[in-house]
Every structure is written in C-alpha cells, then in structure tokens.
Image (cartoon, rainbow, N blue to C red):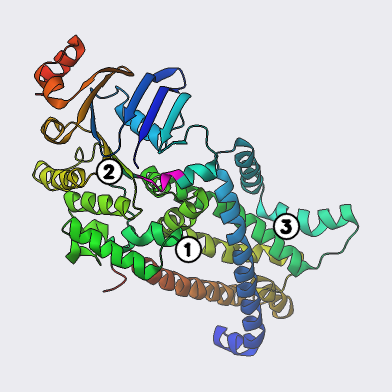
Amino acid sequence: MGKVKIKNLKKSFGELEVLKDINLEVREREVICIIGPSGSGKSTLLRCINALEVATSGMVEVDGNDITGATDKDINKYRQNIGMVFQQFNLFPHMTVLENISFAPVTLKLKTKQEANEKALKLLRRVDLEEKANVYPEQLSGGQQQRVAIARALAMDPDVMLFDEPTSALDPEMVGEVLNVMKKLAKEGMTMIVVTHEMGFAREVADRVIFIDDGFIVEEGPPQELFGAPKNERTINFLNMVL
Amino acid sequence: MSIPELVVQNWSRLLAGLAMTVELTIISLIIAGMLGLLFGLLSVSKKKSLRAIALVYVDIVRGTPLLVQAFFIYFGIPAALGIRLDANTAGIITLSLNAGGYLAEIFRGGIESINKGQMEAARSLGLPYSLAMTKVILPQAVRTMTPALINQCIITLKDTSILSIIGIQELTQTGRLIIANNYQAFEMWTIVAVMYFVIIMILTKISKRIERKMSYGKSEN
C-alpha cells in the first residue's frame, strides 16, 4: 500500500490561487522529489495530501481513500496512515524523545504503552539515537530533532511519508545525517513524497522528480532526465539558479 | 489600645474573616478556572459563532466594574426574578464570572502562544482536535500561562474585599465591624492590610516555586 492519486487539485488562499491544476500519481514504493522556487506551491501540495490544507477543488486519494471529500473522523483515520515530517521538526517540547514517539499510538489506543515504548526504542535505534530516549527535545541538535521527528512519524506504521523541506532549517553539517535516514527509508521501500532543495538527494534517491512553478507541474521525469536534459525553459532557468 | 493588643483581642474574628476571604477565593477560582477554560477554548474555535459567544462574555466582564456586577447579581437579578439570593452565593457567582472572563483571555493567549506547528504535528499523526488540544496544546499553554494565572489568583483574592459591600463577612468587612465598635481606624486598617499582605506574599512564594518546577526538562533533576 502507499498509492497517492491527485486529480485536478486546486487550492486558493482568498484571491491567491496557489495550486492551479495538479495531477499526479504516485506508485507504491516510489520516491518522489518535488522541487521548485519558493512560493511555487510545493508545500501546499504536500499539505493537501494529508488535508492539513483543505483543497479548494479536485481530489486527493491515498490508498484508495478520498481525503478531500472525507468527514473529519475519516480524515483522522487516513492521517494515521500518512506520516509527515516538518521543516521545523515540531517535536512536542513537554515530552521526552521516547514519549514523543510513543505518544500517538498510545493516545489513539493502537498500542499499549509497553508495546509503543518497545517500538519507539527500535525506531530510535534505526535513526541512531537510542541513547537519547529520555532527554527532552530542546537538549538535542536540529539534526537529532529531525531524526526523532522521522521516528515519531514512523511509529504510526504509515504507508506514505511526506517530507516538507526536512533539511531547510538545519545547519549545513547536520543535513547529511537526516538525508541518510531518509535514504535508508527509501531503500526499505517506503513510499515517499519529499519537498526539497537538496538537488543531490533528489538526483540520488528519487525515482521521479517533479518541478513545480506557479501552481502547475511544469515538468516531471526520472532525475537523470530532469537534471540532465530538462526540456522546459522554466525548469532550465530554475536549475541554472540552484545548481 | 496598641496594635498588638488589638490583634490579641480580635484575633478569632480576624481569623474567621481571613478564612472567609480564602474560602471565597478558592471556590470562585475553581469555578472561574472551568469557565475560563471553556470560554478560552471557544475563543480559539474555528466556528465564528462560538468565538462570538466568548467575545461577548469577556467584553461584558471587562467592560463593567466588579462592584456593579456584584450589585447586579445580588440585588438586580433577585429583584427581576422574585427570588432571594444569599450574599455568599451572590459573592461567589460574581467573583467566578468576573475571574472567569479574565481567565478566558489568559487561556486564549496561552493557547495562541503555542506554535501552530504543534497542532499540525499532532493532527498529522491522526489525533482528533480534542486530543491534540488536551494532550499537546494545553499542557504547553498552561506552562506559559502560569505567571498570568497566579496574578489572576492574587487579583481575585483582593477583589473579595469588594464583596464586603454586600455584607459578606470576609476580612475587610470584619475590620469595618470591629472599627464600628472601637473607632481605632488607623490601627485596625493596618492590621487588616498586613494580613492581606502576608497571605498574598505566601501565595506568591508558593507560585514562584511551582513556576520554576514547570520549566521543561528539569522535572527529573
């Protein structure tokens, strides 16, 4: 599982139309990187997938569930299946690292406290932070916090992971450790949609790169094609600026 | 009579007055806390109608003097409804509604001070709004609100003295009644003021300690 289907998606904030007509299908186990200039609508697109933003029109389907037309209760249910990692980590500062990770499964009564804690420790091992289980987020570096945030999302056993510029708020020396965790995840077959400015990561890990500008998908293709031989003039201009 | 002599002579009455003051404060603050939380939550609701209800309540509380509120509840409402309300009940209702309005604003401010990424992170994990609010937002909000909450407790304690006007025998009223007998206004008001001062200082000290304990990551050290 982990299919995402987006059809004729439009999103406006008041007068401002941010997404104009987005059509995208993501296959199971596929890794998609979304690139584009700031203000192009990349983050909004990502946030529409788990209904943090309510689409103005169009449809978003995750694993066959239409999230755009769902009731609040169903949306809560669908979200359990869609992990999200934020630019600003958004760890819960009043909980320890372990509590951050086991919090949702326990609170939603999906796991007992003991099961959730065992799973949390396993996930911490996966992101190489086992020794930090009992500290509070403020005692961690940005890179460590983001790795905990990834573990927290994985604790719900999601079929799809959304990453909203996960390394943009990090000091340069910490970008690598977060990207490594994401690479591992991609290798294990997680369906991932990553909004990023890390072109190296997109080139290396993505199955498909999507270039968004001005609310449209301007160009998409495998990284070798999109980076190696971009066709659209706007893509070429953008890549000239960032590479 | 000197101040120490007056204290000794009137000690049991003064203590009873102080006890009434503290009792009114505690009962009112408990009710006000519930009102404040309820209306604070309404005021951050996505529904405009719920926000409007909270706004009207807070505006009425803030827009009228406490004394007028007390008179309205003690004299006004019983007159209109043809009922009798004893002074203590009227006093507790007045203080609860009054402090509730201010606490609603404190709760609103506390909730709004929490980065909206916290709510989004909780919701993205599949938590419904109610659980995200009670388990993620409110625990953090209450921490930031602590100084303002303590401040409101002290204000409410002092506001009980206004209720002496409707005949509640709290500390201020007790002082007035004693002076009516012995005419020693200077000495008696000094004693009463010192008693208020001491109890508020004790509260302040306790709350400072709570505040320190509540900062993150230090609860285990």
Q: Does residue A221 show up magenta in the picture? A: no
Mark 3, secondary structure of its residue? helix
Q: Quadrant of the C terminus of chain A?
A: top left
Which residue is pictured at 17% across the width and 18% down the height?
A238
C-alpha span from label 1 to label 2? 32 Å
Report if residue B167 is visible in the image.
no
Residue B58, label in figure: none
Residue that numbered label 3 is attached to: B70
Which residue is pictured at 21% across the width and 28% down the height?
A208
Q: Quadrant of residue B37?
A: bottom right
Mark with earlier residue (3, 1): 3
Q: Which residues are magenta?
A: A78-82
Residue that numbered label 1 is attached to: B150
Q: Are marks 2 and 3 in contact (CB under 8 Å)?
A: no
Which residue is pictured at 19% across the width and 64% down the height?
A130
Amino acid identity at mark 2: Gln
Q: Quadrant of the N terminus of chain A?
A: top left
Mark 3 vs mark 1: in front: 1
Amino acid identity at mark 1: Ile
**Structural crowding at the residue carrying mark 3, measured as other residues with C-alpha within 10 Å and reported as few (<14), some (14–19) or many (≥20):** many
Q: Position of residue B15 (x, y in %)?
A: 62, 83
Residue that numbered label 2 is attached to: A88
Say whether residue B165 is left or right of residue A46: right
Which residue is pictured at 52% across the width and 59% down the height?
B152
